Amino acid sequence: MRISIVGSGYVGTTVAACLADAGHEVVNVDIDEEVVDAINAGEAPIHEPGLDELVAAHGGDRLRATTDYGAIRDTDVTFLALPTPSNEDGSIDLSAMEAGARSVGEALAEKDDYHLVVVKSTVIPGTAEETLTPIIAEASGGTEGEDFDVASNPEFLREGSAVADFQQPDKLVFGATTERAFARLRAVYDSVVDDVPVVETGRREAEMIKYANNAFLAAKVSLINDLGNVCKEYGVDAYEVADAIGLDDRIGERFLRSGVGWGGSCFPKDVDAIRAAARAEGYEPQMLDAAVAVNDCQPERLLALLDGHVDVAGQRVAVLGLSFKPGTDDIRNSRAIPVIEGLQERGATVVAYDPVAVAEMREQFPDVAYADSAADALVDAAGAVVVTDWDEFAALDSEFDAMARPVVVDGRHVVERREGITYEGLTW
Ligand code: UDX
């Protein structure tokens, strides 16, 4: 098929490269000329394992990029993969989606045959139907169901494994209103995956499935964190408890790693957006509110454990790990941010280390000292906190002996050395 993808961010580029690899003719539309040039030159504009190879293989060939929305006229399907950030109150900011839908509609005004527009971005239930369809209808002069359809096809890609997640998904979710739209969505994915459950449903349901999926996982982590805090109070190892309850397949073993909490570009934004949407309808989503409240507490609980051993005012404290999870340099909503802020409020001198995310954090916290290795960060420190579960922190051992006071508070259950240091696990 001939497929256009509006937006060459992390989702758009991954989807474009994977669809090109599956044999489709793909064109990415983006306003950023640097991104467009990179894709045409066969260079991935973002870092994801496996993406470089796909863009190198197909960039400038089956995978092209352009700043011209007119390119979508030569395609059968357009995916909208534009950002849906949060407003100050947590509600969703649809301005990029609305502008994109308008540009797509304007391009379709000069297209004769049927076109399918697919919303990939995460949007509140009703957005495809009530907001984007009218914009496209007005700008194109076309009629929904005849000249075009607007479908929903949310993504469930994790950073760091987005290519693999796209190629081997747990499920595909198609929300549409006409058989023609469903058929075209099936045709897009036929050559990408086989033997994967396909959920064919309404658009509002598809939009909600994405929020429910992320909210459920975020709440699952918050629940194990809440239970983990209780465990800690009673001297119980929450990881032993999690291993046991995970054997119950109604609970499942995944996403039971308790610690300093969840961050990233999706969970916080999506949970806030669906909470704001619920409140806008007069419903207070108490479980989701609690999931956020528990998540907000974990960094302070980590620091309170440190306070119990050392007054950090005027002391060096090592912060190990800055990215929101291992395998990425993304620091958006990383738990390292409130941890650093809490240490600074206490008057500590923060020395931070991360294998890949230092440059990003330096922009946000230029006054923090950054070390080139975990070992360097630990030298003369009166305490250390582990915020990201990078593998390399598991191997730290004699490095702790260089600390002024070897107090280590582990927020991710990674440090293996326990002897000869004051070790505190956040929930164990
Ligand atoms: C998530 C969803 O998994 C993905 O389906 C969605 O499309 C985008 O959001 P991502 O943000 O890349 O993906 O990260 P993920 O691996 O899900 O982790 C999210 C956060 O939860 C991280 O901060 C991680 O450290 C934390 N986490 C995860 C835990 O604290 N404990 C766990 O057991 C699992």
Image (cartoon, helix red, strand yellow):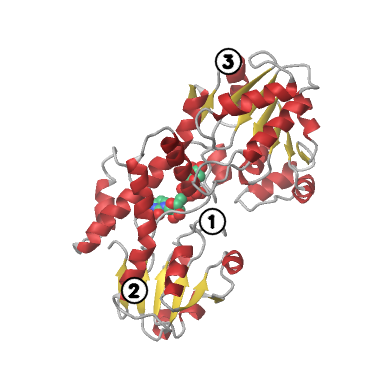
Q: Which residue is mark 1?
A: 332
Give the residue type that dot 3 points to. Thr
Number of residues whose C-alpha sits closer than 10 Å to that of mark 3, classed few (under 14), some (14–19) or many (20 or more):
some
Give the residue type that dot 1 points to. Arg
Image x and y of residue 25, in percent: 74, 31
Q: Are marks 2 and 1 in contact (CB under 8 Å)?
A: no
Quadrant of the image for the C terminus? bottom left
Image x and y of residue 134, in percent: 64, 23
Seen at 58% across and 14% down, the residue is: 179
Q: Earlier in the sequence, mark 3 or mark 1?
A: 3
Q: Is residue 282 left or right of residue 159?
A: left
Seen at 46% across and 45% down, the residue is: 272
Q: In whole angstroms, how far apart are the C-alphas of marks 2 and 1?
A: 24 Å
Give the residue type that dot 2 points to. Leu
Q: Which residue is mark 3?
A: 178
User: Ligand 1 closer than 8 Å to the CB at disc 2?
Assistant: no
Q: Are marks 3 and 1 in contact (CB under 8 Å)?
A: no
Q: Describe the element under mark 1 as helix, strand or loop.
A: loop
Which label number is shown at residue 306?
2
Q: Is residue 149 left or right of residue 125?
A: right
